[in-house]
Amino acid sequence: MIHKMTTSKTVAATAIASMMTLAPAIATASPLGNDPIRLVIPFGPGGGSDITARVLSATAPEFCGPRIDVVSMSGAAGLEAVNFVRNAEPNGHTLLVSDYGPVVTSGFVDEVDWSHDDWQPVMNFTEWLPTVYTRPDHPIQTIDDWVEAARADPGSITFGHASPLGLVHLPLILFEMETGLENVHIPTSGGGETRSLIMGGHIDLGMTLPPSIATEVASGELTALGIFSEERSPILPDTPTFRESGYDVVLPAWLMVLATNDVPAETVEYLQDCFLEALASPTALAMNDRVNAGIEPMNAADATVLYQNTVTNIGNILREMGEID
């Protein structure tokens, strides 16, 4: 069951070329003014979205002008954040940092007053690889351990994840469809809460992204079981893919900065340029390495193609699952 999206790696070279052609400082006049820019995240603090956004917030003011704040809003399964950005003044000062769940999936399955076409990517941070993990003292330490335990006692294994039908939930559903396994799904506010529940022994397994657990995996505090991608993650090179283990479920994702489609084109272009320049700076590269964020930036044009392909792909998956007509 391969659900292959166009990935960030297929167009990363374009973004790198774009960054190399940028002047040492953005030469065009800023359309932003002096008010802070808010990067609004539809999850709780401490997860991969938060970690990655803070690399940008720490480095981009030098290139963009205004201060940049990271704001977490996990209410209503992420829709609180999405609607907050949607209802903000369309001046480029309130942006959404999200994976496909709160925007693409919610646009299909939830009662919302916006459509997928109401959003425009400013840039893409990275390709994300959903990863299943647990504690090192848990009886389940491999994908096969999980399958064996779930088949021996259906409904006995608790599984934590954020974003219903999003990138750390939808792969689990596809895996259950592929294998016939039954797990108890435990919704959380984000990667930080999922990790706390795992480490505290309150749930068995969790799904998150490599940047959220790389440090703990390296120190032996967590065990990564498997990744829903075609290739292993460079952040967790010792963790097998589910495909390697004989389970044909592949569903990578992305993390984008999105604006509403009524933000002026010149403002989006300015934000794209200064964000890309910031992420190419030595400070950002050092932070990226330190927090294992795996940032591989993509410009707005390529991110838009990726976004539109994702809308098509997720729509097809949800129809296959019977979630939408």
Image (cartoon, grey):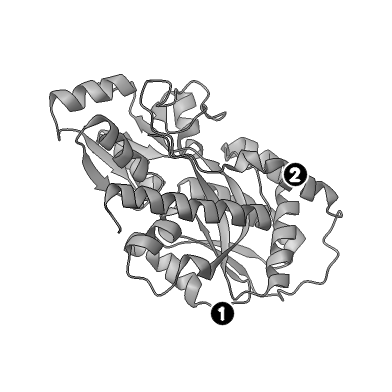
Residue 291 picture location, percent across and down: 57, 39
Quadrant location of the N terminus? top left
Left or right for 111, reference 260: left
Q: Residue at x 19, y 35 (%)?
A: 182
Asked if residue 247 is positioned above or below residue 296 in the image, the reply reads: above
SS class, disc 1: loop
Q: Given the current orientation, which residue lies at the most extreme bottom position? A: 89
Q: Amino acid at mark 1?
A: Glu
Q: Of the residues under marks 2 and 1, which one precedes in the sequence?
A: 2
Q: Amino acid at mark 2?
A: Ile
Q: Are marks 2 and 1 in contact (CB under 8 Å)?
A: no
Q: Quadrant of residue 213?
A: top left
Asked if residue 39 is positioned above or below residue 35 in the image, the reply reads: above
Left or right for 164, reference 191: left
Q: Residue at x 74, y 75 (%)?
A: 31
Left or right for 290, reference 33: left
- Most foreground residue, 128 or 141: 128
Residue 82 picture location, percent across and down: 45, 66
Quadrant location of the C terminus? bottom left
Q: Given the current orientation, which residue lies at the most extreme left position? A: 153
Residue 184 picture location, percent across and down: 20, 40
Q: Residue at x 50, y 70 (%)?
A: 85
Q: Residues within 10 Å of mark 1 (few under 14, many from 20)?
A: few
Is residue 30 at all visible to an observer of this figure?
yes
- Residue 261: which numbered mark, if any? none
SS class, disc 2: helix
Q: Which residue bears the numbered disc 1? A: 89
Q: Which residue bears the numbered disc 2? A: 16
